[in-house]
Image: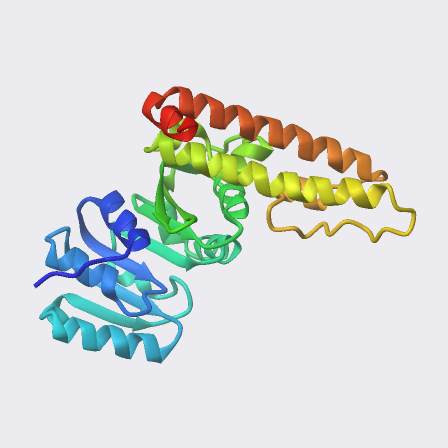
Amino acid sequence: MNITLDSRLGCIAEAIGSACIVADIGTDHGLLPIALLLRGQAERAVACDIRQGPLDSARRNAERYGVSDKVELVLTDGFHGVEVYSPDAVVISGMGGELIARIISEAPYLRGDVRLFLQPMTRAESLRRYLAQNGFSIAAEHLARDGKRLYSVIEAGYAGKTAEYTEAQLIVGMPEHHTDMSLFADHAAMAAERLERRRDGLASSVMQSDAPDVDMDDAELSHSVRCRTYTDKTDILTQLSDTISELRAMTAAARCDNPADTEHKKG
């Protein structure tokens, strides 16, 4: 008996490869850790959630697939209390990047010899910024396509060294970290298009004397853009244009690395 995972969870499972003990934070139905056990990718699993309902669902699924003796179900907020199980691989997925960053910041255990597999649904730039500024190194980035949407899976671990990222790199990741340049090209292009729409909207507002102030909490903009004090909206437009240009350059470079993808786009 096996489980067919959707593209997002399947991408996480593929990235993990194998592990002794996998902890799944925010496990929901528990299908990811159960699938890893059934496939022989993990010896044991810890399924964690902040709500009892999802854990009850995970328990039923574990019983259904005959792995209940290999799964620990833990009702907890984030990673609290999970360190007693000594996981060597930790998945934190299906939540916002800022929440994932908070969970990591509250778990000293994750600064040890642990592989992290992080899948932010929103604010991926906030998560990358936290990792870069707090000594975590990104080993690889994977992308999963589900219809028109691309999901990022960030593979990281604690290295004790900070890193510098450009605005564009915070939004889509460093090109050299990505494992599929065809998907990365689409990822960067989509990000550029989103920022272009915001830039064009802001440019239009600049032309209107009664235009409202720009929303500095825009999820697409990185922390340094949102929180820096600007005296002139044109400064923001310049920053946006620079970031868009870098994203467009990333897209072109990635497609040059994939001639077949370039031909497909032309066709």
Report the colour scheme: rainbow
Task: Name the spot of residue 115 as percent of width and height, x first.
Answer: 30, 45
Task: Name the spot of residue 126 as percent of width and height, x first.
Answer: 55, 47
Q: Residue furthest front?
A: 267
Q: Quick check: 173 left or right of 198?
A: left
Tell me which residue sits at (9%, 70%) in the image. 66
For the question of whether residue 133 can be seen, the reply is: no
Quarter where residue 27 is shown:
bottom left
Q: Residue furthest right?
A: 209
Q: Compare residues 205 and 222 and report the one nearer the observer.
A: 205
Task: Name the spot of residue 158 as percent of width and height, x first.
Answer: 38, 40
- Give the total of numbered labels: 0
For the question of whether residue 10 can be seen, the reply is: yes
Q: Quick check: 96 left or right of 62?
A: right
Task: Name the spot of residue 83 as percent of width and height, x first.
Answer: 31, 59
Q: Quadrant of the C terminus?
A: top left
Q: Quadrant of the N terminus?
A: bottom left
Q: Compare residues 99 and 252 and report the one nearer the observer.
A: 252
Quarter where residue 236 is shown:
top right
Q: Compare residues 178 and 97 and report the one nearer the observer.
A: 178
Tell me which residue sits at (30%, 46%) in the image. 114
> From the viewer's perspective, is residue 155 above or below residue 20?
above
> From the viewer's perspective, is residue 240 above or below residue 31?
above
Tell me which residue sits at (53%, 38%) in the image. 170
Tell me which residue sits at (46%, 57%) in the image. 106
